[in-house]
Every structure is written in C-alpha cells, then in structure tokens.
C-alpha cells in the first residue's frame, strides 16, 4: 500500500512531496480541468443543475477517474454547483434558493438567463486528487455579475503569483484580500483552501485573507488549493438545512474560482490549467 508515505511533514503538518509526485498531480488536475472545459457548452437557460451533474458524472466515468466527492462525508454527487448567492457546496438537482434579485420565482433546479454558477469537480487519478472550480453563465451575464467574476478570477491568479518558496501562506491571503477589497467586494472567511495530494483535504487551511508574512512558510513540494469565494455584499455566510448549501447571509451575489497548485523550486505549478485555455471566461466563444 502507498498511503501518504512519500516525503515528510513540516512541523505544521504540511506534507512535502517528492519531485516525482508532481506528475501524478498534473495528470489528476488535467482530468478535472478537462471535465470543466467540456461542460461549458451545456450551460444555458433551461438546463438544470441536475442535468449538469449527470453530464459531469458521465465525464468522470469516461475519463477512467474516480469522483472524490461521491461518498465524501455523505455527499452524493460528482459536482458542487453553486448558483448566484450560493457561496459553495450547492447540491446539483436541488431547488435553487431564492435570491435577492430573483424575478423569476423558479420552483426547481433550472437555470434562467443571467444566472451565474460555480461548478466544482474533484477527481482521483492513480491516487492523486485534482480539485478545481470555475464560473459559468446561463445566457448573458449582468454587468455587475461579470465584474464580480472577473475580480474573483483575478484574485485567485494574484494569490497564485504569491506562491514561491520563502513566501508565507499569509502572503497569499493578503494578496487576495487586498485586491478584492480594493474593488469594494468582500472575501468569504468561513471557507478556505486546503492541502491535498493523495488525500482530499489536508493541512494547512489556506485562508483567502490575512497579514503579509504570517502563517507557515511555503516550501518546494507543498500541494494545496487556492479557492477564493468573493461576495458583492457582506462576507457572512449561512448553511441551509440540507447541511451543505452555503449562501450569503445578505443574499448578495457570490463567485469562486479554484486551482490546485504545487510549490516548485522557484515558483508554482498550476495542476488544473484548462487544456482548452477556457478557465476564464467560460461563457464567451473562444
Ligand atoms: N471540492 C470542494 C473543495 O474545493 C469540496 C467539496 S466536498 C463535497 O474543497 F462533499 F461537497 F463535495
Ligand atoms: Co478545494
Ligand atoms: Co473544489
């Protein structure tokens, strides 16, 4: 059995992986990213989140990968689909909760023109975890929704730019928070990124806010996700009675982008880059 045996742990419990482990993460990340590329044409008004889940589940099976989320803490789906003011962990196929700007009075899981949604997929390939999410739009996005998605995407990439040996996890959080708040939007505090590798969620908690220079130091061989959730309104969230769906308390719009990354000798490798170059935006023709 090879179970988290390679490498060593830092005193913060963060695993330092071997150079050869990057290859496994790269393969898993590419499979997850490819699935997110391929779902894009299926997002349109009238599509349902349950329908998108079926497409994703089929794509995971066709790729030969294993879904990391089916059976994870009782979760039953191959994707999380978080529409509008759903911050994260939206359950595909469930009724979309009514939000502030909802004029449609929808009663099911079907998308309407202007909905924005995050689709989050995690797969296991040869024991390695690939975890990524990005934003999609049904039809035409409102200008404010587009701005939110752009700032959220850019905050992730600015966080990734802070990933190099010698910097700290606080530098990543600080870079993301400063950028987001300079656009008068807010960073969600209640959910964070995480270490991963041969496990789904491992130390450290990767905060998307914080003080420069705080937190553990980044070392070559660390693997983790960065996955900022950004709200147009206040940062507070609440989890619905289904015990998964997290929404903004003030019912403002929320967006999220997520990459799995590894620290290299002089910087970072992004494991979940889109093979088609469609990480963002996903709703305009290439
Ligand atoms: N993929 C999510 C993350 O970024 C975790 C989803 S867990 C689930 O960490 F059970 F809700 F699927
Ligand atoms: Co994650
Ligand atoms: Co994820």
Image (cartoon, rainbow, N blue to C red):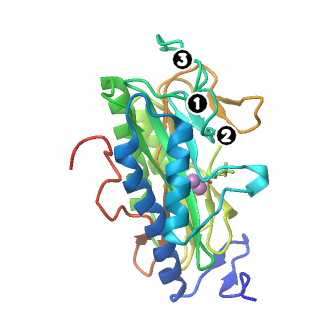
Q: Which corner quadrant of the image does residue 198 belong to? A: bottom right
**Which residue lies at the image location 55% right of the left edge and 79% below the top edge?**
221
* Residue 57 drawn at (x, y percent): 56, 55
Of labels 2 and 3, earlier in sequence is: 3
Residue 93, disc? none
Q: Disc 2 beta carbon < 8 A from ligand 1?
A: no
Residue drawn at the location 43% of the way across and 69% of the way down: 30
The x, y position of residue 165, in whole percent, is: 48, 74
Q: Are marks 1 and 3 in contact (CB under 8 Å)?
A: no
Q: Secondary structure at mark 1?
A: loop
Instruction: Count residues near mark 3 (Cα–Cα under 10 Å), then give few for <14, some for 14-19, many for 20+.
Output: some
Q: Nearer the viewer, mark 2 or mark 3?
A: 3
Find out if the beta carbon at label 3 lies less than 8 Å from the nearest ligand 1 atom: no
Please, is residue 245 above or below residue 106 in the view? below
Q: CA distance from mark 2 to mark 3?
A: 28 Å
Q: Where does label 1 land, which residue?
A: 235
- Name which of mark 2 and mark 1 comes first in the sequence: 2
Residue shown at 47%/10% (left/top)? 103
Q: Is 240 situated left or right of 123 in this image?
A: right
Marks 2 & 1, CB-CB < 8 Å contact:
yes
Q: Which mark is residue 106?
A: 3
Mark 2 = which residue? 190
Q: Residues within 10 Å of mark 1 (few under 14, many from 20)?
A: many
Residue 271 in which image quadrant: bottom left
Q: Are marks 2 and 3 in contact (CB under 8 Å)?
A: no
Residue 112 visible: yes
132 relative to 39 in the view: left or right: right
Vertical comparison of 85 with 190: above or below: above
Q: Position of residue 247 (x, y in %)?
A: 62, 29
Query: In which quadrant will I find the N terminus?
Result: bottom right
């Amino acid at each position: 059995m090879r179970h988290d045996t390679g490498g060593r742990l830092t005193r913060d419990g963060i695993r330092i992986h071997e150079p050869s482990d990057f290859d496994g993460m790269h393969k898993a990340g590419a499979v997850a990213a490819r699935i997110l590329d391929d779902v894009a044409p299926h997002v349109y008004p009238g599509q349902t989140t349950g329908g998108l889940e079926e497409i994703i589940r089929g794509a995971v099976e066709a790729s030969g990968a294993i879904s990391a989320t089916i059976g994870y803490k009782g979760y039953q789906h191959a994707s999380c689909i978080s529409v509008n003011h759903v911050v994260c962990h939206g359950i595909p196929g469930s009724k979309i909760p009514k939000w502030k700007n909802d004029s449609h009075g929808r009663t099911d899981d079907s998308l309407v023109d202007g909905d924005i949604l995050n689709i989050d997929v995690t797969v296991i390939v040869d024991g390695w975890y690939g975890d990524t999410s990005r934003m999609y739009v049904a039809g035409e996005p409102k200008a404010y929704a587009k701005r939110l998605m752009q700032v959220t995407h850019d905050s992730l990439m600015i966080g990734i730019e802070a990933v190099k040996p010698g910097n700290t996890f606080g530098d990543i959080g600080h870079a993301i928070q400063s950028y987001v708040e300079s656009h008068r939007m807010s960073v969600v505090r209640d959910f964070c990124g995480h270490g991963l590798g041969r496990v789904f969620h491992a130390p450290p908690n990767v905060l998307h806010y914080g003080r420069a220079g705080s937190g553990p130091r980044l070392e070559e061989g660390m693997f983790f996700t960065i996955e900022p959730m950004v709200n147009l309104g206040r940062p507070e969230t609440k989890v619905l009675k289904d015990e998964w769906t997290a929404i903004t308390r003030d019912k403002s719009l929320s967006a999220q982008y997520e990459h799995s990354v590894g620290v290299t000798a002089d910087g970072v490798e992004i494991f979940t880059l889109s093979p088609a170059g469609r990480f963002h935006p996903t709703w305009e023709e290439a």
